[in-house]
Amino acid sequence: MGAWGINLYDDDMALDIRDTIQDELKLGIPLNKILDQLKFNYDIEKYDNNDEEPVFWCVIADTLWNLGLLDNEVKSKALYWIDLGGDIQRWKFETPGLAYKRNLVFLKLKQKLISTQPPKKRISKKRLYVCPWNKGDVFAMRLNGELAKEKNLIDTYLLFQVADKYLHPIGLDKKIGHLCPIVRTKLTLKKKIPQLEDFNNNEIIKNDFPCKTTNWKNIYAILIYTTSTRTIP
């Protein structure tokens, strides 16, 4: 088991399911699609002996009840597994001393699920970062940090050009995420504000690690991963 305690959320899978539902709803993903994907991920209703189903349906029912979104179908599935004893047999086999307390957790959950759920909660939509830069744009950043001081580069400029943009997926739907810039960088040792020819006349910096793009092979580009315009002025 991936559990470290008797409570419903003392479990890696339970936390993952709860967090996935909450995060995906904030991205505007329809609830039925979220549940379908979770069922696929955990092989739910695919095999007769899947001992993760009790926790699966109970966590979903509890999460949706808290949000005021619990429907009769999910509620019935959770109550079905609770009435069968939840995952008590698994606990009796692996941690018999805690099986009784684990069963009480499910019985308490049953009382919660058959009670009136709270009103539907407003789910605030997650804001996604969309890089406003255009492909080909060139920027200069004055170096003044500790590393620049160590390398004797204080007040010189790092130059970078937007080479492309990369959709960094953050949910189950790989088409939804932060649109981040991929840049090529150059360095000028001049301490005056650089001009375009300074970019053209310097070599592109080779990176220690390939850029996180679809092929991971580009060593002359860097992905700037960010989730907010506050990160990149």
Image: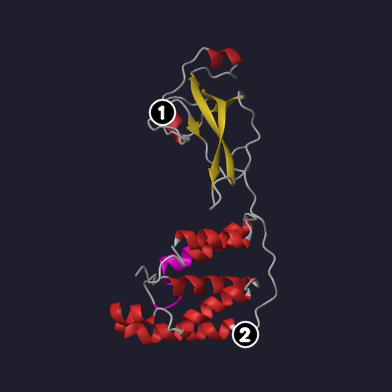
* The image quarter in which residue 134 lies: top right
Q: Which circle marks residue 115 in the picture? A: 2
User: Mark 1, residues whose alpha carbon is within 10 Å: few (<14), some, or many (≥20)?
Assistant: some
Q: In this rendering, is residue 167 above or below 150?
A: below
Task: Tell me the magenta residue range.
Answer: 6-16
Give the camera-side residue of 74 and 170. Answer: 74
User: What percent of the width, then of the height, locates residue 233?
Assistant: 62, 37
Q: Is residue 15 magenta?
A: yes
- Disc 2 marks a residue whose amino acid type is Ser
Q: Which residue is mark 1?
A: 207
Q: In this rendering, is residue 182 above or below 178?
A: above
User: Mark 2, residues whose alpha carbon is within 10 Å: few (<14), some, or many (≥20)?
Assistant: few
Look at 30% across and 83% down and name the residue there. Answer: 96
Q: Which of label 1 and label 2 is nearer to you?
A: 2
Look at 46% across and 83% down and name the residue there. Answer: 105
Q: Is residue 111 magenta?
A: no
Gap between marks 1 and 2 measured at Cα: 58 Å
User: What percent of the width, then of the height, locates residue 33?
Assistant: 59, 58
